[in-house]
Amino acid sequence: MRPYLLFAVLLLTHRSLQAAPRPYLDVVPALAQRLVTAQARSHGLGAEDLFFTLRNQTSQELRLRVPPGLHFGAGDPEAQDLFTFQERLLVLAPGASGTVRLWGFCMEQHDHAPAANSVYSLRGLAPNGLQQLGDSLQKYPKLAELYGQMFVWSLTDHEPLRDIRVPPALLRGATNVLRYLAAVSGQLAVHARSATDNRPSVKVFSKRLFINYHSPTRQVTSLRVYGPDDCERYVVARSWQLTPGVMRYRLGLNTILGIDELPEFTVRLLDAQGHVLQETKVNQATAEVDIPPVQLPFAFAFSLAKPVKNAHLRVRLTDGTLVEELRQLPYLPAGNHRYNWTFYHLRAAGTSFVARLEGEDGKVFGQQLISAATTP
């Protein structure tokens, strides 16, 4: 080869190498190497409601890939973590920021949906077979739109899989996804059937429920959800230690229903023996309203002629029903005593109570009527 021809070939190769773009770097290792910073905010569940912002921390241009199958953790511990399935590419100049919008599916069936402008953080690649599901949903976005939430819950919360209807072009992909989900989740195989009307066979029912209960004593309870046939659907809390006082809990009642199925559920709080302490009926019309407890401050004054051991300060209804064990007092000397207390309850406003100092045998050493009219 002539020298000038060899030089031309080398020059062309050099220019080709210079022109070749740098490969895209996945965002998870980019964060681990501190090449970028990230923040995420969600405006609810739905298409492109998760805003994921990346900032280039280097002095060079970065080509970044947001891969399918990511896990975003909620800043609110009672809100749902999110799983994303879409691939996004972006190029950031040195010091520049860029935002991509992602579709997040719920990863925690019994928590509530994110509120507007909720803070999230990238936890990394999603576990429990979700990463492979993300790749499939990226390939078949229509399948994600129709059945993505059922697919995710089948892996994260053991939600039963159901037969599905899909457009003919999706039949093969849907069949492969269902086989994969059944194998990973240990469920029986279900089937995809071809349909031309684009009508899904299932829907998502989601309701935020506020559970308020006034526990009179320390006790072990469980919180369970039952279906319309009164069969247990799932256990929210299997062994829940309650202390005396008002317990407040927000429950995300989320499940998959048949497309024409009406939601009918019962949420029961049970004691250790299985007795129902409180139950709440839930359907489509159930209001998502949190009723705060009533605050009732009072001063309880009494006098003892002689010392008392192992006394109990209790609040009861006027008919004697125990409302709350406020405090156990190992020893009280003789003399005058006064306790200032703020009592919270869930009874109707204006309900009258009786504060009592009681002994181990039930003997009453002092009592005082307390109501809104008698508080300080």
Image: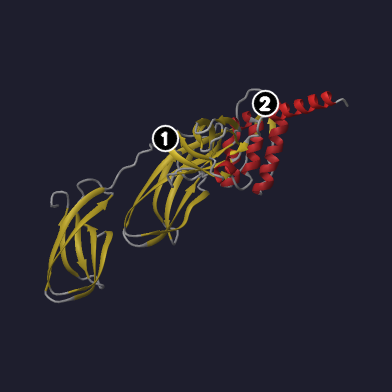
x and y percent of residue 284 in the render?
45, 35
Q: Residues within 10 Å of mark 1 (few under 14, many from 20)?
A: some
x and y percent of residue 262 in the render?
50, 35
**Residue visible at 13% across and 66% down?**
302
**Residue visible at 21% across and 71% down?**
363
The residue that label 2 is drawn on is 167
Image: 158 above or below 84: below
Q: Pick the residue in front: 132 or 6.
A: 6
Determine whether the residue tagged by mark 1 lies in a helix, strand or loop. Answer: loop
x and y percent of residue 2 in the render?
87, 25
Residue type at numbered disc 2: Pro
Q: Is residue 57 left or right of residue 370?
A: right
Residue type at numbered disc 1: Asn
x and y percent of residue 90 in the render?
57, 30
First in sequence, mark 2 or 1: give its number. 1
Image: 278 above or below 303: above
CA separation in Å, label 2 and label 1: 35 Å
Q: Residues within 10 Å of mark 2 (few under 14, many from 20)?
A: some
Number of the front mark, 2 or 1: 1
Tag of residue 117: 1
Residue 163 appears in the rendering? no
